[in-house]
Image (spheres, coloured by chain):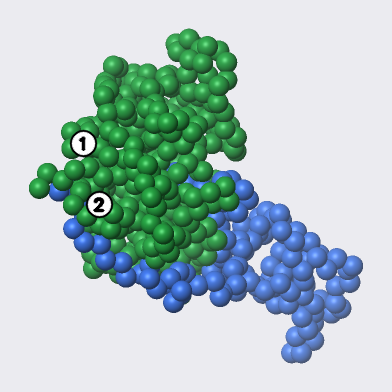
């Protein structure tokens, strides 16, 4: 005999019960120098994005510290807020890779792109 | 070997779907086709089994030659993948399965067309759907099919660990294949969880992959080609090997059609091999040109007398091609069967037959069940 003696399936009958992985959580794509980010785009562990300075910093853009009586932007404190029409930009390569390295959240979407971009629809 | 014309069961759609073959039909007709079946002899089954066992170890020998000679460019393998391949080879990382596609007419020895050693599909139909078909339509007959038990036995090697199962979203065949494999894994007493490839997360602080519950992924079955993984964003984390994948990285050597000319160089005139080369010239205008990494028969070109007699489209080929002598394909009323012999844990374990009016098996080729007379 080469055939199976008994085949029992437990999961397949329960597909509708949600055995497959959930899709409820939003994904956090990797930070890259190809993406654009707006002022104060927050990344845990990396901080707040400052669009005119193309990087992440510890405080929000033009954050006002009441003790210091100063504003924060681009890594420095100043008595006046920074004025710029730039509220969205791409980070520098260094800023993106540094932020990606230090972020304490979880990034997702780094696998599966070849398939979704049409790399193929069936396996062998 | 005989091909029988059969009367399909009146409720075959519901029956095969109920055991996981939800993708039994495609737009142009049935994929699961029980309007025919193949009857083999016990000798023919033994011959297919022996061929797959022999070929599996020939492929491993050929992979070793690739490593020793550093023939990475011949297989189109990216340099960044090489260290992981070498480490997984040295560790002899666990390999679950693969499927040889063989040309066989019942007379000449089976000939290897290719080895789907990384992401083989057509598993649910071979392991489950045709077994239930057999028990209902040919209850006294035998079938080359112990895939189910062998999968469970193989998974037992992972006891004490959690295996994640990753496939892609919104593809019925892949979802059911992954689910079926998870089913067999759990039946082996192994803890299993599912995570779609797109949902795998990278925890930058702890430097490991996590699922949607933020549980670390340490051992992951992936129905996703290695060559795609290495091209994607998270590939930069792979070199540190924060996760062990099943199939392991060393299977990149076996699932690559660049191995076909190497096999022929190492084992010329082996009865289960077809002549194959890195160039077309030795085959004198009569050959099948295959991309090294293509799947489901994509971008295959059949040349005869210097003329293209059959060709398929697709997105593969940039990685280079190999050239293989055409196999003598049996013809049953215009149908050409290809014999997919499953290898589980390094040993032949079952058979699935797909047939087509074309000579190039593609993703529309139909799965046709088989049986052979029981020796009891």
Residue beneath disc 2:
B138
Choose between A21 and B143: the one closer to the eye: B143
Q: Position of residue B353 (x, y in %)?
A: 36, 41
CB contact under 8 Å: marks 2 and 1: no
Residue ID at (49%, 50%): B30
| Rendering quarter of residue B37 | top left
Residue A120 vs A94, above or below: the answer is above
| Rendering quarter of residue B340 | top left
Q: Position of residue A105 (x, y in %)?
A: 55, 71
- In which quadrant is the N terminus of chain B drawn? top left
Left or right, B87 with respect to A18, comes to left
* Residue B65 in sight from this viewpoint: no
The colour with which the image depicts chain A is blue
**If you read the primary sequence from the N terminus, does the residue marked by circle 2 or circle 1 appear first?**
1
The colour with which the image depicts chain B is green
Q: Report the disc number at residue B226.
A: none
Mark 2 is surrounded, within 10 Å at the Cα level, by few (under 14), some (14 to 19) or many (20 or more) other residues, namely some
Q: Report the disc number at residue B41.
A: 1
* Residue B172 in sight from this viewpoint: yes
| Rendering quarter of residue A85 | bottom right
């Amino acid at each position: 005999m080469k055939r199976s003696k008994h085949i029992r399936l437990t999961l397949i009958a329960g597909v509708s019960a949600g055995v497959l992985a959930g899709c409820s959580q939003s994904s956090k794509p990797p930070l890259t120098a190809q993406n654009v980010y707006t002022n104060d785009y927050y990344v845990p562990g990396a901080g707040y994005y400052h669009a005119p300075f193309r990087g992440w910093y510890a405080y929000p853009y033009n954050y006002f510290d009441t003790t210091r009586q100063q504003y924060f932007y681009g890594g420095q404190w100043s008595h006046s807020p920074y004025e710029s029409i730039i509220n969205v930009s791409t980070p520098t390569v260094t800023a993106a890779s540094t932020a990606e390295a230090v972020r304490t959240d979880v990034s997702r979407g780094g696998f599966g792109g070849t398939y979704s971009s049409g790399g193929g629809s069936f396996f062998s | 070997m005989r091909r029988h014309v059969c009367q399909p069961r009146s409720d075959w759609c519901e029956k095969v779907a109920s055991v996981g073959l939800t993708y039994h039909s495609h737009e142009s007709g049935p994929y699961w086709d029980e309007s025919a079946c193949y009857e083999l002899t016990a000798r023919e089954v033994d011959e297919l089994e022996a061929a797959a066992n022999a070929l599996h170890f020939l492929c491993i020998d050929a992979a070793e030659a690739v490593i020793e000679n550093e023939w990475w460019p011949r297989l189109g393998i990216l340099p960044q993948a090489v260290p992981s391949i070498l480490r997984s080879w040295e560790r002899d990382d666990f390999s679950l399965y693969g499927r040889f596609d063989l040309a066989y007419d019942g007379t000449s020895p089976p000939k290897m067309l290719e080895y789907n050693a990384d992401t083989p599909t057509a598993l649910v139909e071979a392991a489950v759907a045709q077994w239930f078909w057999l028990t209902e339509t040919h209850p006294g007959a035998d079938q080359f099919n112990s895939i189910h038990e062998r999968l469970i036995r193989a998974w037992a090697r992972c006891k004490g660990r959690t295996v994640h199962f990753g496939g892609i979203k919104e593809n019925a065949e892949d979802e059911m294949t992954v689910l079926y494999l998870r089913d067999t894994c759990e039946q082996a007493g192994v803890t299993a969880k599912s995570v779609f490839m797109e949902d795998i997360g990278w925890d930058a602080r702890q430097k490991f992959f996590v699922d949607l519950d933020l549980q670390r992924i340490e051992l992951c079955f992936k129905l996703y080609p290695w060559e795609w993984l290495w091209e994607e964003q998270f590939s930069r984390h792979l070199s540190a090997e924060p996760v062990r994948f099943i199939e392991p990285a060393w299977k990149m050597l076996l699932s690559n059609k660049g191995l076909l000319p190497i096999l022929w160089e190492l084992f010329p005139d082996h009865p289960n091999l077809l002549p194959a080369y890195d160039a077309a010239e030795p085959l004198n205008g009569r050959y099948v040109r295959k991309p090294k990494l293509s799947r489901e028969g994509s971008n295959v070109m059949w040349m005869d007398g210097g003329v293209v007699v059959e060709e398929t489209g697709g997105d593969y080929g940039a990685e280079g091609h190999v050239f293989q002598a055409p196999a003598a394909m049996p013809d049953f009323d215009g149908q050409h069967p290809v014999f997919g012999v499953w290898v589980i844990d390094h040993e032949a374990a079952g058979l699935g037959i797909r047939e087509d009016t074309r000579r190039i098996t593609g993703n529309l080729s139909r799965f046709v069940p088989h049986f052979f007379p029981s020796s009891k």
